[in-house]
């Protein structure tokens, strides 16, 4: 999650006095407005609970009225403070921090605590209505949906709630995975658009864990509808022969066999992102990014209209980071120079950049500019979490159950991911968001035809393949 405080507001208090509100954004979207005194109170609580050594520095109080320069300086300091707390494995996962954000979100949107119906969508568009409190957190809503569906308690952790936007053409854009610091009802209703809704989808990557889910009738149905939906949307590539086999299995009602065949298809279990821009292999290339199978897959359209495909394995990424910036949007202006954000409507520009081992001794930064950069980052981190659990001999089944029971915190899952010091970045202002894996495996980049058929992949490489001797994906 990317926390920022890009702006402040002067607001009126109850007694007619004014105060400065600091707008906390998560992934470029307003999450809550808070006063300095509220953040100071949170800081004092954290300091009391965890001690001075662990808590990051907090901007001091001022005796006199703040000047505009003082306000801007405090905004920057508070932003760094919130980012430091969130990125700390212990503080960022603490109930103290998350409950503060949930309460602030509810107060900002001025939504009282009351019982309300909330529609949760399944992959096939079916709606499940649950009665919840507006103050229920993500895990509470997930449990309510699971109970309504009669999903076994031990399987609840295999699924997550995602905020998505559905276009007029039925296209689905993943906005983010709902987190422990937000209230799902408030998050979706505050967007004030029927395009946004919450969808239930599996939350793991390794298809080996599909067997756990398929042993349960409800789990099987959920996984089956997701597979059918992904095929219908074109996220999973199917040729004519495979399509005929799938249709036959569907007509027979052979759901397990349908999923088993689906597992053999290209992009099974991947999340597909909206078209965006990358600087690889050239600047300004249009690309469709998909996440799955421990990789980011690129389908790139080069300036000469040639299509290329490449797979960037998470095990070859030395690090990755997300940056956000305010970009002015000027409409109807003939001025060649964009107006500053203070005098024009602005939008948030998000970038995901990762440092990748292209060959034995060559690391290269690859940047993706996309509104879904944070979601891509979350996908990478969850892949690393799974790989590290597997490497340590643990069971993701147990990890998911612990997470569902509330005993596994972000700190536990991230402690296993040890990264070397970050190498110098082309942009020193980038904020590190995620940890990374330290052992690396191979890369291959292939040319594909414009048909996007799974059978049309040729053997034309962008780069030669290289793998450390004795080290592969299974050696993580």
Image: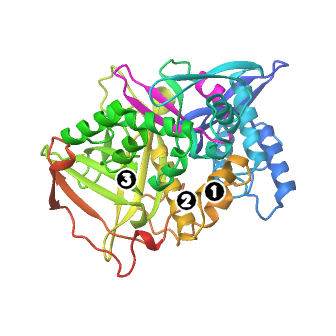
Residue 365 quadrant: bottom left
The residue to which callout 2 is attached is 385
As drawn, is 338 to the left or to the right of 64?
left
| Identity of the residue furthest to the front in this view | 252
Q: Nearer the viewer, residue 173 or 430?
A: 173
SS of the residue under disc 3: strand
The disc label shown at residue 474, or none: none
For the question of whether residue 7 can be seen, the reply is: yes
Crowding at dot 1, Cα within 10 Å, few <14 / some 14-19 / many 20+, comes out as many
SS of the residue under disc 2: helix
As drawn, is 440 to the left or to the right of 220?
left
**288 in relation to 188, above or below:** below
For the question of whether residue 272 can be seen, the reply is: no
Question: Is residue 154 inside the magenta stretch?
Answer: no
Measuring from the top left, give residue 276's x and y in whole percent.
33, 40
Please report the bounds of the magenta region as a residue range: 162-190
Measuring from the top left, give residue 161's x and y in whole percent.
57, 36
Please give the name of the residue rendered at 48% of the width and 32% of the height, measured from the top-left corner. 341
- How far apart marks 3 and 2 lie (CA) works out to 16 Å
- Dots 1, 2 in contact, CB < 8 A: yes
Q: Nearer the viewer, residue 470 or 196?
A: 470
**189 in relation to 86, above or below:** above
- Dots 3, 2 in contact, CB < 8 A: no
Measuring from the top left, give residue 148's x and y in whole percent.
65, 28
- How far apart marks 3 and 1 lie (CA) works out to 24 Å
- Which of the marked residues, 3 or 2, is nearer the chain's N terminus? 3
Please give the name of the residue rendered at 50% of the width and 68% of the height, measured from the top-left corner. 422
Question: Is residue 188 inside the magenta stretch?
Answer: yes
Measuring from the top left, give residue 125's x and y in whole percent.
46, 24
The disc label shown at residue 296, or none: 3
The residue to which callout 1 is attached is 399
- Which of the marked residues, 3 or 1, is nearer the chain's N terminus? 3
């Amino acid at each position: 999650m990317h926390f920022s405080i890009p702006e402040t507001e002067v607001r009126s208090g109850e007694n007619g006095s004014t105060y400065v509100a600091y707008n906390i954004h998560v992934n470029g979207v307003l999450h809550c407005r808070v006063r300095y005194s509220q953040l100071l109170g949170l800081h004092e609580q954290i300091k009391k609970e965890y001690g001075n050594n662990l808590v990051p520095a907090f901007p001091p109080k001022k005796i006199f009225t703040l000047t505009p320069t003082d306000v801007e300086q405090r905004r920057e300091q508070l932003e760094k403070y919130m980012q430091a707390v969130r990125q700390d494995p212990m503080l960022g996962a603490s109930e103290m921090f998350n409950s503060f954000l949930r309460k602030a979100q509810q107060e900002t949107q001025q939504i009282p605590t009351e019982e309300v119906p909330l529609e949760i969508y399944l992959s096939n568009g079916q709606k499940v209505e649950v009665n919840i409190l507006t103050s229920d957190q993500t895990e509470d809503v997930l449990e309510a949906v699971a109970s309504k569906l009669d999903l076994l308690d031990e399987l609840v952790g295999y699924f997550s709630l995602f905020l998505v936007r559905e276009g007029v053409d039925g296209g689905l854009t993943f906005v983010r995975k709902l987190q422990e610091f937000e209230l799902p009802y408030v998050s979706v209703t505050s967007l004030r658009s029927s395009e946004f809704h919450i969808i239930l989808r599996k939350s793991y990557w390794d298809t080996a864990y599909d067997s756990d889910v398929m042993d349960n009738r409800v789990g099987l149905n959920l996984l089956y509808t997701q597979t059918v939906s992904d095929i219908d949307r074109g996220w999973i590539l199917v040729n004519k022969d495979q399509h005929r086999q799938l249709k036959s299995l569907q007509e027979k009602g052979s759901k397990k066999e349908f999923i088993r065949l689906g597992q053999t298809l290209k992009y099974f279990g991947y999340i597909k992102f909206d078209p965006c821009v990358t600087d690889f292999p050239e600047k300004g290339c249009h690309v469709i990014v998909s996440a799955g199978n421990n990789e980011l897959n690129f389908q790139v359209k080069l300036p000469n209209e040639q299509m290329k495909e490449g797979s960037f394995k998470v095990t070859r990424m030395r690090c990755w980071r997300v940056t956000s910036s305010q970009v002015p949007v000027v409409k109807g202006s003939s001025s060649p120079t964009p107006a500053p954000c203070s005098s024009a409507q602005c939008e948030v520009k998000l970038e995901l950049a990762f440092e990748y081992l292209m060959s034995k001794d060559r690391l290269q930064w690859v940047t993706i500019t996309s509104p879904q950069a944070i979601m891509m980052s979350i996908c990478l981190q969850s892949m690393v979490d799974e790989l590290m659990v597997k490497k340590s001999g643990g069971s993701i089944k147990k990890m998911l159950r612990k997470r569902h029971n509330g005993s596994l915190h972000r700190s536990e899952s991230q402690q296993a991911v040890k990264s070397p010091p970050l190498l110098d970045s082309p942009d020193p202002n980038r904020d590190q968001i995620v940890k990374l894996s330290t052992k690396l495996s191979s890369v291959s980049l292939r040319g594909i035809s414009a048909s996007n058929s799974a059978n049309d992949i040729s053997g034309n490489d962008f780069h030669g393949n290289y793998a450390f001797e004795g080290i592969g994906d299974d050696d993580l």
